[in-house]
Each structure stands twice: as C-alpha cells, then as structure tokens.
Image (cartoon, rainbow, N blue to C red):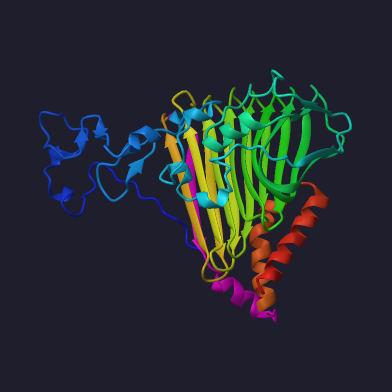
Amino acid sequence: MAETTHTEISPDTPLDGELGELDEKARLGAPSGERAVIDGFTEEGERLPGGDDGTEQLGFKKHSHGNAPVIPEASRGERRRSFDIADFPTLTGLEEDWRFTPLKRLRGLHTEALSGTAPAVEVTGAGNVTVETVGRDDVRLGASATPEDRVSAAAWNAFGDATVITIPKETVADGEVMVSVRGAHAEAAAQHLLIEAKAFSKAVVVLDHQGSATLAQNVEIVVGDGAELTVVSVQEWDDDAVHVSSQQAKVGRDARYKHVVVSLGGDLVRLTPSSIFTAPGAEVEMYGLYFADAGQHLEQRLLVDHAVPNCKSRVTYKGALQGDDAHTVWVGDVLIRKAAEGTDTYETNRNLILTDGARSDSVPNLEIETGLIEGAGHASATGRFDDEHLFYLMARGIPEKAARRLVVRGFLNEVIQQIKVPSLEERLSESVERELAAGNL
C-alpha cells in the first residue's frame, strides 16, 4: 500500500497558479504596509466571516473559499464540553464530528429520550479488584470526563445505575478483569462505566460487547500516578446492533496506559476514545482493529491530548473492508498544547480494501502549539492487496485464496498481539477467520 507523503512548503517555495504570480511581498508574514492585499485574509490569517445560514449557531464558521460549507473550531482543544444536552445543537450531518456518520442509522440516539433497558453488565475475574453498582449521584461519576458531543451528553443524562471498577493502590489484579456487556433490547438506552486504576496499580480490563442493543455509552477511565492499565474494548455485537461509545481516559504522572479497540460486529459502531495527559512522564499506546462487511459502518474518532510536558504516545489502527457499502472511518486527532514541551508522538492508520464497493475514510490530524518537542508525525494508507506479497506466497506453492488470507491475517495480527490475553487473542483470530470466510476470500 502506498504511504501518504507530506511536503513541507517554505516561504521560498514557488507556488503555481494565481498566488504564484503575486509579488514576494504578498506572502503572509510580510509587514502589512508592504504586502499586497489577498482577499479572504487578514494579518492574523484567514478571515472567517459569519454566515447567514445559521451555521455559526452550530458552533462552526462558514468557509471563505472552496465548496466546504463550514469548518470546525480552529483548535481541537476548543471543542465544546458539557453535561447539558442543550449545549449541543440538534445534529444535521454538517458538523465536522458527524459528517461521516449516517445519522438515520443511529435509531434515535441523537434525537430521542434514551429510556430503554441498558445491556446487562457482569464482571468476572476481578479477584482483588473492587466492583460496585452505584447511583448517578455518586461523586466519582463525571469527575474525570465531560461529554464532548450530543449523544454522550444524552447518555450522561439518561443512565440510571453505573458500574464502577476500582483497582486499589499498589495492587496487581489477579488475572484479567472481564466486563461482559450483553444486550437483549432494541430500544435506545444509556450506560455508564467507570474504571479507576489507583496509584502504582496494574490491571487489564476487557469490555466485551455482545448481543443486540441500541446503546449510547460513556466510559470514564482514570489511570493514577505510576499505574499500568490496559483497557480492551471488543465490539462483537449482533448484526442489528447500534453502539455509540465515548471512552475518555485521564493519565497521571509516570503512568502507562494502553487502549485497544476491536470492532467486528454490529450494524453501526462509533467509538470516540481519548487520552488526556494530566502530569509529565506518562506513556500512552492506542491500538485498533476493525473488519467491516457489506453494509456495515465502523467508525473510530480518537484524541490524544498532550497538555503537559515530556509525555509519549503511539497510535496504530488497522482495518479491513469487504462487500458493497462496507464503510470504515478513522479520524485521529493529536493535540500538542503550548505547555507540552518534550512531547514524542506518532500515529498511523492502515486500511486494506478486499473487494469492490467498500469505502474507507482516514483523516490523521496533528496540531502543534510548540516547537520544543522530541518528535511528532502521522501517516495514513489505504489500498488493495500487495501483488508482490501474493506473488511471493504463490510462487512457493500456496494457492491464491490461502495466500490472500495469510496476507490479511498478518496485516491484522499486529493489533491482536497487543491484547496480551491469550484466550481473547485466540477468539478474535477465529472471528477474523469467520469474516474472511463470509467474504469468500
């Protein structure tokens, strides 16, 4: 698959077209009294006039050129956060955060009261880990995460009881903590989970979603100072399920946090994982695997917020698609704030399209507010099978069909191996095999 390349343009780089014919003084950054006037720009940058079509009321501003109707706030860090659903206007599909999502398939998660029965939650393998069912008045709820969109705010206002999982201070969990989320109802419902790893604790928590549901879910994750926490979110829903989940993590000083997403089932699954550094010295790894079949919509929108100095993050998401109207979306936002000196970050997304009729959207975003960093980069690639790989395998006597499956297995296995739970890795490998068989690959 071909890599996406990024070309740096310096002030001396000649530009083609109309702008290239302007005098040298027309460049932005030249003294205002010496440069030519460029329509649509001010000395502060691009002028963004307000529209008369109501777009500013959505929290967007009308674009000054091109066909794009609106653009989002200037910075990822400026996105609205609120527990009040009224602070998020009714969705239209024009919003940047929702432009890829088929709103009609949300089954009312963004428009109706979430009054249905939430999927049952069962926690096993907890051992020396504390598990509680608490009311929404528990002071720990909402202390570490604030909704960033309308569906998340609706879920916050609608859930009844919440499940709280706590790994005590300096505790190593006895095995994996398995959180089984089993849906059996199609009515729109809300759910809230809180996972807290106290200082210097260590645990692996698996959120295993199965069954049928229409679910708006908030997952709060707190990683204490010096703690090591892995959270694996598996979406193996039935074919009719709709799942929208906000999974926000706050990562403390010198902590290690790994988040793994595996999305295989469901009609529409939309996850928005985020990692926010709250103190220096922490490291975050975020992995994702998704496999979309005909008509399936799998969407991942993640954020890594480097708000403090000397933290490191790595993001790797991989997806495969097959069948008519199979659609995957990956949007990766990495924000390096002005105070985050010494940041080291890289994100990558790879998509393998197996058949005609499938579509993959991949949007890596990197926003840097300080130049005093160790390194930052991103890459995205989408393509079909590598003919050289197939030729190599077939030249050694492997039939084409078997060779294709080997390529897909190898492509996705990098993420599966990051789970570090042998039984779950085996189960997911078998699920990938079933996906390949279903597509007659």
Q: Position of residue 326 (x, y in %)?
A: 56, 62
Along the horizontal axis of the image, is 190 left or right of 38? right
As for residue 379 lying within the magenta part, the answer is yes
- x 89%, y 32%: residue: 127
Relative to 119, say whether 163 is above or below. above
Relative to 99, say whether 354 is above or below. below
Outermost residue, right side:
127
- x 20%, y 32%: residue: 42
Along the horizontal axis of the image, is 154 left or right of 178? left
* Foreground pick, 39 / 91: 91
* Foreground pick, 273 / 295: 295
Q: Position of residue 358 (x, y in %)?
A: 53, 65
Q: Position of residue 315 (x, y in %)?
A: 58, 44
- x 48%, y 26%: residue: 341
Instruction: Work out whether residue 74 can be spotted.
Output: no
Quarter of the image with the C terminus is bottom right
* Foreground pick, 72 / 9: 72
Instruction: Work out whether residue 52 can be spotted.
Output: yes
Q: Position of residue 51 (x, y in %)?
A: 27, 37
Query: For residue 141, which quarter of the picture?
Result: top right
As for residue 83 lying within the magenta part, the answer is no
Along the horizontal axis of the image, is 206 left or right of 323? right
Along the horizontal axis of the image, is 97 left or right of 184? left
Query: For residue 74, which quarter of the picture?
Result: top left
* Foreground pick, 194 / 20: 194
Relative to 105, say whether 160 is above or below. above
State the extent of the magenta-drawn residues as a range.
372-400
Outermost residue, top side:
139
